[in-house]
Amino acid sequence: MDAGSDYDLVTVRRGRGGVTTRERLKGRDIAVKSQFSVRAGDFLISKRQIVHGACGLVPPKLDGSIVSNEYAVLLGRPSIDLDFLNYLSHSIYFQQTCFHSAIGVHVEKMIFNLERWLSWDFDLPPVSEQRRIAEILSTWDRAIETVERLIANARLQKQALMMELLVGDRRLRGCSGEWRTLTLGQAAEVIVSNVDKKSVAGERPIRLCNYTDVYRTDRIEADAPFMRATATPAQIGRFGLKVGDVLITKDSETPDDIAVPSYVASDAEDLVCGYHLAIVRPNIGTDGQFLKFYFEHPHTRSFFASRANGATRFGLTVDAIESAPIRLPPLPEQRRIADAIATAEREIGRLSPIVITLQKEKSALMQQLLTGKRRVKLDARAA
C-alpha cells in the first residue's frame, strides 16, 4: 500500500447481509499491512464470523476494495457460478458445513478452516442451470428491493411532514389561527389500565389489546385478532377502547423505546386496553390522530426517554405523561395535518405486506431450486 493513497476497507454483515464498506483510510493509517484486493463478483467469507452467516458477493461499487487475511476470497471455477453460490449460502446445509468447518469452543471465537470446508461435498446442477436459478432468484431480489425503496421513501416523506407540520414550521394552505402551548394532561385524559391476561369465572368475556398489539402496529382495528380474557363491568367501562383513543406503551426495557403509540381507528364493545399500556383520550379540541403522531415526533420521544424511571426495566408515571408539553393548532388544522401524515403512513402499511409476501415466495423458491426438488427449464442456447 502507498502511505498517502486512500483505500476502501470492506466488511461482511452477519446473516448473509452482504458486503459493505467499513471505512476509507490512508495507507499509513491501516494498522494491518497485509491486505488483499477484491474484485466485483468475488465471494467473500469472514473467517471469524462465518458461523453467523458473514459471507457474500462483492458488489460492483466496492470493486478494488481491500481486506485483510481475516477473510477468504473465493474465485469461481468453470463448474460453479458465484451468483448461485451466493444464494446457496442461505441454505441450511451450507450453514451447517461452515459451522462444522470452524474451530473453537466459544461460538464468538470460532475460526473458519477453509481447507476443511472445501472438502465437503455439495450437490450442484450444471453451471447453466446454476445461472438460470440465480437469474430467477435475482428477479425476486429486484422486486423486493423496489418495494423496500418505496417504503423507505414513504417513511422519509412521513418523517419530513412530521418535522415540519407538528411544530408549526410549515402551515398548510388555508390554515390560520394561533397555536396553543399546553401540557398533554390539559389536551387529553391519561388512563392507565390494570386489566391482566387472566380469565376469571363470573367476569365478562372480552378481547384484550395487549402491549405487542400496540408496539407492532400503527392502528388498532376492532376486527384484528386479539387475546381472549375476562374483565369486570367496571374495568370494561373504564378501559374499553373508543375511536380516537391513542394507546402508548408505558413500560420498556430501554428508556428510548418507551411511549410507542397506536391510534384506535375502530372500536367494539368487548375490546379493552390491557396491562402495561396507557390510554390517552383526547379532550374536546384535540384530535386523536394528531396526538398519535405527536408521540412519534423526536422531541416527544426524547422527553419521555428522559423521564422513564427504572434500572433493568423502565416505566412512565401518569404525572410524567401528563406533564409532556404540546403545541396544538386549531382543531381543523390538527385534522388536516394528521390526514397528510396518515397518507404516507398508510402507504407504508400497504407496501409492507407486499415485501413479506415476496420474501416468503423467494424463500419457498430457494428451498425448491437449491435442493434439486424442482428443476428449471433451460432454453436451447443455455443448454
Image: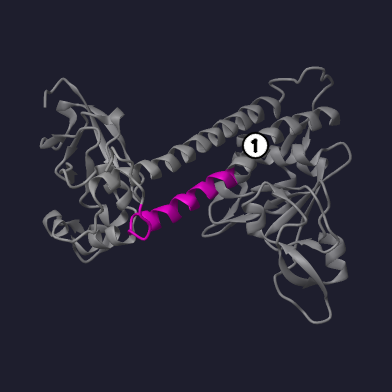
- Residue 212, position as x, y percentages in the image: 63, 58
Q: Is residue 265 visible?
A: yes
Image quarter of residue 267: bottom right
Tell me where the magenta segment starts and ends, as one range.
352-375
Q: Which residue is mark 1?
A: 347
Query: Which residue lies at the image location 86% right of the left edge and 61% below the top edge?
Result: 269
In the foreground, 202 or 188: 202
Residue nearer the viewer, 344 or 365: 365
State whether residue 74 is above or below residue 116: above
Quadrant (top left/top right/bottom left/bottom right) for the C terminus: top left
Q: Is residue 366 magenta?
A: yes
Residue 232 located left or right of residue 321: right
From this view, report whether residue 327 is shown above or below residue 49. Answer: above
Give percent across and percent down for residue 70: 17, 46
Could you tell me the amino acid type at mark 1? Glu
Residue name at image x 36 percent, y 45 percent: 17
